[in-house]
Image (cartoon, rainbow, N blue to C red):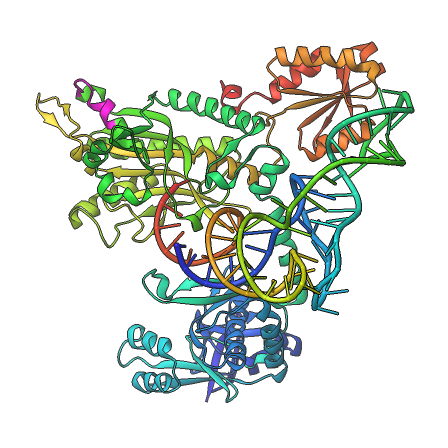
RNA sequence: GCCGCCAUAGCUCAGCUGGUAGAGCACCUGAUUUGUAAUCAGGGGGUCGGGGGUUCGAGUCCCUCUGGCGGCACCA
């Protein structure tokens, strides 16, 4: 008997029945066989040492491919688990998947692990690799597996099998030699030696069993694993580089803002940071006005009764900053702007002719966020949303959503960000409204996104309890994802707060609300923007656009004149008249990421010129002052005004 | 909030197993007047995050509080 295997290049070859993928690889070439880590037969994973059960399309998965790294990392997780259990008897294994760039394994153990244990664990892992234990795949029956794991005290494993595996389905167990085994879907390497040593344990963390806060807290050990040492070194280098872009670090270096103990999650904006803020705010004001929004401002603190009416007192109180006055009134700082906007909508009578009514506010909100979630500017307790609410009829939802997506994408693009990854957050487990309502609402959001030319990723169960939403998110320097823009459908709040408009029919109707933000919060957005450009803001956003650096004091008067003229032209200019060499000034202002340094010395003063040097370049561009001002002002023009 | 780690000068960090605090940059003063990524010299500056304990003696060991960092959970 023989089987036919089709290779990715289309070649078809005949092999003996029951041949293993590893034997096929060896048959092709020795070096190939060394680098292969698993196989796929007709797209399905297959262990290298598992005899093929028929012909088909065979793909040999190499260790440095994306799929190959998955396999390596999965094996690294198993080797980690074995090492930990050998070194710390009594530790239970739970779950150990791969993640981006690495893997983790969650353990249950009474005593705490410490990062000091990493060295010892890594050493044992290397010993397991050196031992080159054969990795064997076994197929067990469900009850046998449960009994086995229970007998060796692996309660979590037994529970997982009991709940995850359907009765009758076989269970695959992978073991390293005769020493250690774990429930796993596979595939795995033929032996532990093939893992190699390009791995490293990276961090230790707490994690809840099944991600539920009410469950036991497990100890998670994270690691990274790569095809070879070089890849590992490259990865570590990449992490180091990313850390340099961290907005918290840059915020200090560039003197944008600071935070301190007495105001956790609150930002002290310094002059430069606030300049950035105001520039962004002014831009947003122009864009939203042009998109037909009216700008409003609602109170910072409102009576408890108001929040009771909006439903926040009941649902959101743990997150609210509540205060009492000397006259025993209970008030709360606003955690959201929406109820306030409804009040403006309700003031006087609204007609269907007013719809859609687009209301915007740079709304400063306070939310008591869990201490452990605070993170620089990205997650704070006092923040300003570029908030907005569109009051409209149900039949206007789709068009409003579509044009919002287009507006948001255009704005993100002006800041140099691509926001084509949009998530549609669908109905959560605990929700208000019928299934029919959710079917319709989700379909509307999806259709609106498609009409704007984007295919959203579905975020199952992530919607608000009252309606679905679309989220725009981007990643920060260290790989975390943050939501910037969002648009959320809401039928509930207009109802709770009794918002109405008079329809064509003369009767009263309930409007629908679309909560929306394009930047999310100014704080977070500035954080993301800072990381995106590594602190080197584009000219139109840079807090200081030009530094005029003198060569000797002889040029001071001329430098002052240059500064005056540039400022008159609207440029943000600083003077560097210090008694230092020009090389020093160039270095310092370059490190401060100033986009343009204008060097002036005696020569420039005599000829009414400036020597321009751009950030990142070495060229000196000596041009007339008037010409320089014209060029720089044009470069500093915000993108929307440039288009106008 | 939970788990782990961390906290020394404005910043970045050193300070071995307990013996009484140091570097570079920054800052101040002086000299220097300089042509595109660090001019030289001098000086000031720390109750070693707060509190408690062990010890003859604590930056160093223990407890506790506060804050920061990384995850988890929660979220703009």
Q: In this view, does A110 lie to the left or right of A224?
A: left
A522 to A501, vertically: above or below: below
**Residue, x 66% and y 14% (percent of image)?**
A566
Q: Position of residue A518 (x, y in %)?
A: 40, 33
Number of residue marks? 0
Q: Position of residue A34 (x, y in %)?
A: 63, 76
**Residue, x 35% and y 84% (percent of image)?**
A150
Q: Where is residue B21 in the image (x, y as percent from the top left)?
A: 76, 50
The residue range painted magenta reads A342-351
Q: Can residue A202 be seen in this view?
A: no
| Residue A340 shown in magenta | no
Q: In this view, does A236 lie to the left or right of A482?
A: right
Quadrant of the image occupied by residue B19: bottom right
Closer to the camera in the image, A591 or A191? A591
A585 to A369, vertically: above or below: above
Q: Is residue A397 visible?
A: yes
Q: Is residue A610 left or right of residue A89?
A: right
Q: Position of residue A174 (x, y in %)?
A: 46, 81
Closer to the camera in the image, A315 or A56? A315
| Residue A349 shown in magenta | yes
A394 to A430, vertically: above or below: above
């Amino acid at each position: 008997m023989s089987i036919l295997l089709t290779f990715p290049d289309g070649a078809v070859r005949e092999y003996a029945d029951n041949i293993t993928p590893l034997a096929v690889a060896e048959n092709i070439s020795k070096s190939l066989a060394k680098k292969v880590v698993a196989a796929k037969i007709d797209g399905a994973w297959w262990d290298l040492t598992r005899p093929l059960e028929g012909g088909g399309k065979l793909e040999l998965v190499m260790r440095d491919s994306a799929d190959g790294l998955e396999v390596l990392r999965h094996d690294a997780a198993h080797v980690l688990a074995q090492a930990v259990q050998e070194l710390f008897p009594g530790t239970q294994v739970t779950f150990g998947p791969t993640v981006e760039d690495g893997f983790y394994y969650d353990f249950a153990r009474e005593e705490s692990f410490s990062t000091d244990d990493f060295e010892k664990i890594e050493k044992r892992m290397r010993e397991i690799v050196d031992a080159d234990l054969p990795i064997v795949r076994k197929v067990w029956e469900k009850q046998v597996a449960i009994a086995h794991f229970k007998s060796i005290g692996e309660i979590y494993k037994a529970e997982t099998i009991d709940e995850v595996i359907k009765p009758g389905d076989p269970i695959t167990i992978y073991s390293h030699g005769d020493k250690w085994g774990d429930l796993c879907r596979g595939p795995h390497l033929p032996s532990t030696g093939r893992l190699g040593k390009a791995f490293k344990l990276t961090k230790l963390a707490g994690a809840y069993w099944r991600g539920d806060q009410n469950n036991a807290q497990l100890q998670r050990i994270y690691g990274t694993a790569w095809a070879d040492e070089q890849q590992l070194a490259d990865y570590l280098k990449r992490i180091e580089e990313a850390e340099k872009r961290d907005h918290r670090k840059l915020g200090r270096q560039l003197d944008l803002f600071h935070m301190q103990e007495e105001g956790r999650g609150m930002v002290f904006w310094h002059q430069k940071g606030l300049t950035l803020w105001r520039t962004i705010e002014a831009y947003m004001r122009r864009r939203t006005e042009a998109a037909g929004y009216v700008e409003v401002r609602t109170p910072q603190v409102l009576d408890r009764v108001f929040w009771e009416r909006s439903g926040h007192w009941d649902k959101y109180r743990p997150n609210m900053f509540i205060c009492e006055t000397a006259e025993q009134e209970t008030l709360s700082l606003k955690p959201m702007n929406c109820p306030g906007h409804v009040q403006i909508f309700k003031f006087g009578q609204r007609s269907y002719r007013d719809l859609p009514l687009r209301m915007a506010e740079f709304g400063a909100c306070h939310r008591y966020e869990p201490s452990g979630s605070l993170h620089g500017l990205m997650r704070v307790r006092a923040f300003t949303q570029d908030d907005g609410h569109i009051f409209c009829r149900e039949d206007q939802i789709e068009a409003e959503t579509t044009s919002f997506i287009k507006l948001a994408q255009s704005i993100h693009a002006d800041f140099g960000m691509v926001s084509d990854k949009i998530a549609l957050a669908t109905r959560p487990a605990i929700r208000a409204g019928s299934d029919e309502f959710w079917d319709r609402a989700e379909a509307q959001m999806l259709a609106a996104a498609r009409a704007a030319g984007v295919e959203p990723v579905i975020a199952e169960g992530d919607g608000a309890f009252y309606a679905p939403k679309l989220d725009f998110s981007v990643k920060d320097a260290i790989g975390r994802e943050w939501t910037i823009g969002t648009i959320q459908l809401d039928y509930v709040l207009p109802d709770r707060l009794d918002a109405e408009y008079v329809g064509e029919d003369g009767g009263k109707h309930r409007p629908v609300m679309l909560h929306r933000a394009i930047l999310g919060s100014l704080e977070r957005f500035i954080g993301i923007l800072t990381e995106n450009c590594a602190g080197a803001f584009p000219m139109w956003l840079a807090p200081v656009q030009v530094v005029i650096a003198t060569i000797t004091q002889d040029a001071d008067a001329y430098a002052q004149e240059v500064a005056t003229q540039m400022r008159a032209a609207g440029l943000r200019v600083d003077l560097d008249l210090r008694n230092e060499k020009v090389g020093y000034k160039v270095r310092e202002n370059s490190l401060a990421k100033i986009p343009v340094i204008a060097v002036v010395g005696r020569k420039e003063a005599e000829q009414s010129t400036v020597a321009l040097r751009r950030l990142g370049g070495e060229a000196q561009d000596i041009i007339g002052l008037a010409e320089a001002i014209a060029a720089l002002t044009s470069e500093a023009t915000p993108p929307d005004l440039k288009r106008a």
